[in-house]
Image (tube, rainbow, N blue to C red):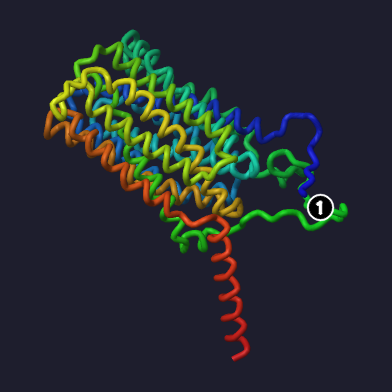
């Protein structure tokens, strides 16, 4: 059996990292990832730009983030999270302030590019890579807690709509940028690379050893440890990356949830409340994975999350619409709110934990960065597709119907994943084969 020595009763520092990262994630979600949809109509009404032009800018932001993500991962593995995050937070604040002063389209694009650079170095990947290094046994719970803060941020959408209506979108953007500095810089100063650098072990354990029936102590249990080059050769990595990227493609269109609901002849207040209430299902999904994500097969849980997300986005396309001879009215609205949120929310901690479970902590920052790059490429397509479809059809409905069908791609990819034990065995076998070949060359 395994005996586990615990640290003293003080709170494990990894949980402080989760808390600090979570607060930053909450703010970033409230004002950008989930909240930026509140700026779409006010900015377009002021500037007269088309939805396609706006969507193209968002797609550029996500595309740039995708190109930067692998580099961010390498920088995290090399320099640690503190310096990387400070750099990103400073740029993010300037990006919002620049956007608040924009007068022309190129100003908008410049601020979006600056935001992409800042967000990439200052938020998501930094926290994911750091938390992944501080937890092993409780990895799903830690990721669930971290990502729940992001979901809760969406609840602030009605408040953000009120702020924009009351004070205007320019002052709102300016003070959002200042807020990033106030919150993000102190959090960056508390970031630490990994517990071993400070005399601790993951999860706050003092020591992990396996004892036999006679009380004899064996070697500590070893984690899976795969280098980034080996990871890129594995089919499992690409299955995971493409599957979660399809989910990211669909979720990236959340920028247009609020405008779509308004188009479906729902009042502005109800539309804002419904778009914000997606966070309720999102929170339930993320929190639930904290309880069951470390106990059950993650690939089954991830597959189920994709299925629920598919039902949610399909329901969005049916609101106040007649399909198959049925006038659906508002019946699909709660299905969209709970289904989209629950499915997407559950997938977030699962996808992050699966990457760490399959490939280990050795190059986790780089692995997450590359996987995020693949997701960002798909995420670039989503808002651009929806925006252009709206310009051509004058409706968001066809785009979201297609988004629902897109989720069917992710399900078989996760269902057919090999077990992490089998993947690790293949890596070890490949390593032994390389050693034998090198020995034969030297002998020859």
Pinpoint residue 176: horizontal percent, then vertical percent. 43, 21
Of residues 30 and 422, which is closer to you in this image?
A: 422
Residue 256 visible in image: yes
Answer with left or right where residue 199 lies relative to residue 366.
right
Pointer 1: what residue?
A: 211
Q: Is residue 310 above or below residue 280?
A: below
Q: Residue at coordinates 40% horizontally, 13% vertically from top-left?
A: 159
Image mark count = 1
Q: In this view, does 216 lie above or below 284?
A: below
**Image quadrant occupied by the C terminus:** bottom right
Q: Is residue 164 above or below residue 201?
A: above
- The residue lying furthest to the top in this view is 166
Of residues 202 and 398, which is closer to you in this image?
A: 398
Residue 292 found in image quarter? top right
Pinpoint residue 198: horizontal percent, then vertical percent. 74, 43
- The residue lying furthest to the bottom in this view is 444
Answer with left or right where residue 25 lies relative to residue 12.
left
Q: Residue at coordinates 56% horizontally, 47% vertically from top-left?
A: 76
Answer with left or right where residue 434 lies relative to residue 273.
right
Q: In this view, does 389 lie above or below 207?
A: above
Q: What element carries label 1?
A: loop
Of residues 53 and 345, which is closer to you in this image?
A: 345
Residue 193 visible in image: no
Pinpoint residue 92: horizontal percent, then vertical percent. 44, 32
Query: Mark 1 Cα within 10 Å, few/some/many (few <14, many 20+)?
Result: some
Of residues 12 and 313, which is closer to you in this image?
A: 313
């Amino acid at each position: 059996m395994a005996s586990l020595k615990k640290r003293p009763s003080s709170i494990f520092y990894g949980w402080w990292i989760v808390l600090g990262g979570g607060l930053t994630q909450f703010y970033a979600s409230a004002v950008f990832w989930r909240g930026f949809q509140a700026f779409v109509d006010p900015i377009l009404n002021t500037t007269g730009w088309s939805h396609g032009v706006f969507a193209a800018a968002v797609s550029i932001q996500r595309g740039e983030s995708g190109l930067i993500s692998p580099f961010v991962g390498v920088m995290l593995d090399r320099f640690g999270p503190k310096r990387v995050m400070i750099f990103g937070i400073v740029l993010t604040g300037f990006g919002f302030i620049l956007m608040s002063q924009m007068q022309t389209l190129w100003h908008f694009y410049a601020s979006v590019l600056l935001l992409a650079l800042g967000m990439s170095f200052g938020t998501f990947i930094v926290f994911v890579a750091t938390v992944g290094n501080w937890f092993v046994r409780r990895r799903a719970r830690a990721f669930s807690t971290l990502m729940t803060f992001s979901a809760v941020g969406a609840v602030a959408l009605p408040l953000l709509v009120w702020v924009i209506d009351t004070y205007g979108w320019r002052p709102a953007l300016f003070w959002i940028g200042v807020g990033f500095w106030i919150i993000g810089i102190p959090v960056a100063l508390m970031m630490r690379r990994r517990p071993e650098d400070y005399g601790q072990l993951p999860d706050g354990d003092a020591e992990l050893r396996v004892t036999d029936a006679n009380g004899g102590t064996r070697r500590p249990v070893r984690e899976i440890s795969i280098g980034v080059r080996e990871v890129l050769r594995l089919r499992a990595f690409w299955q995971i990356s493409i599957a979660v990227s399809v989910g990211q493609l669909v979720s990236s269109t959340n920028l247009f949830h609020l405008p779509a609901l308004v188009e479906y002849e729902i009042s502005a207040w109800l539309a804002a409340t419904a778009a914000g209430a997606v966070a309720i299902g999102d929170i339930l999904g993320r929190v639930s994975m904290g309880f069951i994500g470390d106990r059950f097969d993650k690939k089954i849980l991830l597959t189920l999350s994709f299925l629920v997300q598919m039902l949610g986005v399909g329901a969005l396309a049916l609101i106040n619409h007649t399909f198959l001879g049925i006038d659906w009215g508002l019946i699909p609205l709660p299905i969209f709110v709970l289904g989209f949120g629950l499915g997407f929310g559950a997938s977030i901690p699962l996808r992050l934990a699966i990457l760490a479970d399959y490939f280990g902590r050795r190059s986790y920052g780089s692995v997450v960065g590359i996987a995020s790059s693949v997701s960002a490429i798909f995420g670039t397509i989503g808002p651009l597709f929806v925006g252009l479809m709206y310009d051509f059809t004058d409706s968001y409905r066809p785009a979201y119907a297609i988004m629902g069908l897109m989720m069917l791609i992710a399900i078989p990819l996760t269902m057919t994943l090999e077990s992490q034990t089998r993947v690790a065995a293949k890596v070890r076998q490949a390593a032994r084969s390389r050693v034998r070949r090198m020995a034969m060359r030297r002998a020859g």
